[in-house]
Amino acid sequence: MIKTLLKSLREYRTKTILVPILMAGEALMEIVIPFLMTFIVGELQSAADPNTPNVVELSNILLYAALMILCALLALFFGTLGAKYAADASCGFAHNLREDMYNNLQTYSFANIDNYSTSSLITRITTDVTNVQNAFQMSIRMLVRAPVLFISSIIMTIFIEPTMALIFGCAAIVLGVVVAFCMIRVVPYFRTMFRKYDKLNSVVQEDLTAIRVVKSYVREDREISKMKNASGEVYKYSVKAERILTVMMPSVMLVMFIVNIIILTVGSHMFIADTVNGIQPSEMQTLIQYSVQILSGVMMVAMCLNFISLSKGSAERICEVLNEKTTLPEPVQPVYEIKDGSIDFEGVSFCYSQKKDVNVLSGIDLHISSGETIGIIGATGSGKSSLVNLIPRLYDVSAGSVKVGGVDVRNYDLDVLRGKVAMVLQKNVLFSGSIAENLRWGDENATDEEIKFAAKQACADEFINNLPGGYEYDLGQGGVNVSGGQKQRLCIARALLKKPKVIIFDDSTSAVDTKTDAMIRSSLRKYAPEVTKIIIAQRIASVQDADRIIVLDEGRIDGIGTHDELLKTNEIYREVYESQMQGGDENA
């Protein structure tokens, strides 16, 4: 896990290495200062002793004072520079981590994406990375500084009075046990808390996306209740974790006070028992300072472990995203040219998860000629969308092969294949920006004339010209200020700008009236006769003039033929047609 995360350091490796060195330098300077103070206090104590000559060596005091000032300045320099480098390294590390996660997400197939919820991915890229960033910054600053402070203080204590070093060692062991106990208890709560964060983000995302539905059905109270419950779950587990962690700081302070009391008690006894060779008041003062530094070192480690325990679950979730490999590997020698729009399904079977035994598609054998218009009809769940998703290799087949232009789609460069296979989905997605900017998703170098021509083919030019600003009209987030039918026509125009060899309409004219639907199909026949057109539809009217119509039933081809042929030979098609005729759909 650590190895995976550290790959994102890249240009910040040098600063990451320098930070612990600078922190160690700061700690050593802080160790030297109390030691120098001992000599100054010793000089003053000697001057105050009536049994010794009352002479103060001012030069010695000034020398020790100058050395203390120098050590303090060096500690300031090392500490400031270390803090700056730690901030640069941690922020850069977080930036690279988010970038690496997002870049890897772009390589995912639909099968990979199916493993995660959108809210979970958002939490991982935002909250989880922030947790890891904080733990990283704390670790590179304190996980070296604290041990250096602890070990150096113990060595200096042994040099002054070995008995006191034993007391400090026992105190450190007690604190270590307390910290370890807290860490073991708190990690499971943090893991659960992050899962609850996913749920919380899911509720927020869903409510904000569907806010119009919420308001139109007057369900604000219900959604507020859902939000309260989700937020309450996060609160419950975070409070449980924090209650455990709050034990650490009071424990450190309690042990620190007890140690100081022991030092004063034992040290006073040793001084009274032997005022000449026993421990001196100046040494007592230094020992107290070292006790503070020793226990501060333990406290720093405890704080680091606090951040690490908080971030451990986050780090695991981040590594899941980074280590996820696409289920659509690139071919060793990819093909970069698609000859034509012909499509062949040869013995195709498909299921969404290799762990499942139930196929969504089974035994599909089909040849579609380049430039042919194919309609696909079938009940919900019959495998219509699954079938067409295999053409641009959004998923790979479980068995058999899918060929475009006579070449297995698994042998194409993925960008080339998807650049020549355009899809217009039922759920249309537009982005913030102008209409022209959205259409240029099909071809970023498209001229204004090409944009207008694509819009004309999709029967979108009329309503665009009536909008304020025309093609520069701002659609807002998700195209909130145009209708569903207008969205669909814009998405069709966007797909046509790709100049594809195959274009797939996945129930993408469901929001337009039958007249506009017919105009779009007529326009495509006129302006793009060489493009293979696959139309998935619920309405017979949308496919009845196709060259051939495919009837799917439970993942298998139940019938293929023209409209007239299927009316005579296919029961499913005939039932759909008659039900729509009775409902008057043919005249809609």
Image (tube, grey):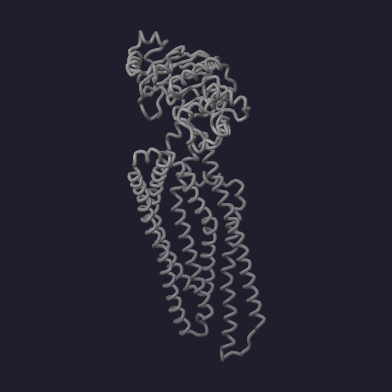
Residue at horizontal 59 percent and vertical 25 percent from the top = 452
Relative to the observer, which residue lies in front, 284 or 347? 347
In the image, residue 100 sits, relative to residue 361, either above or below, namely below
Say left or right for 219 vs 48: left
Q: In the rendering, at what x and y percent does residue 145 appear?
A: 54, 61
Q: Position of residue 478 (x, y in %)?
A: 49, 36
List x then y, in percent, for residue 560: 41, 12
Q: Is residue 311 above or below residue 380?
A: below
Is residue 159 something that shows in the picture?
yes
Residue 506 seen in the current view: no
Q: Residue furthest bottom?
A: 50
Is 181 on the left-hand or right-hand side of 131? left
Comparing 166 with 49, the one in front is 49
Question: Residue at 47% of width from left, 67% of height from top?
Answer: 295
Specify the farthest residue to the right. 59
Q: Residue at x 37, y 41 (%)?
A: 215
Q: Residue 104's spot in the image, x, y percent?
A: 52, 37
Does residue 262 lie above or below 200 as drawn?
below
- Report the side of 334 relative to 508 (left or right): right
The number of callouts visible is 0
Quadrant into which the C terminus falls = top left
Q: In the image shown, does 455 or 566 lie closer to the viewer?
A: 455
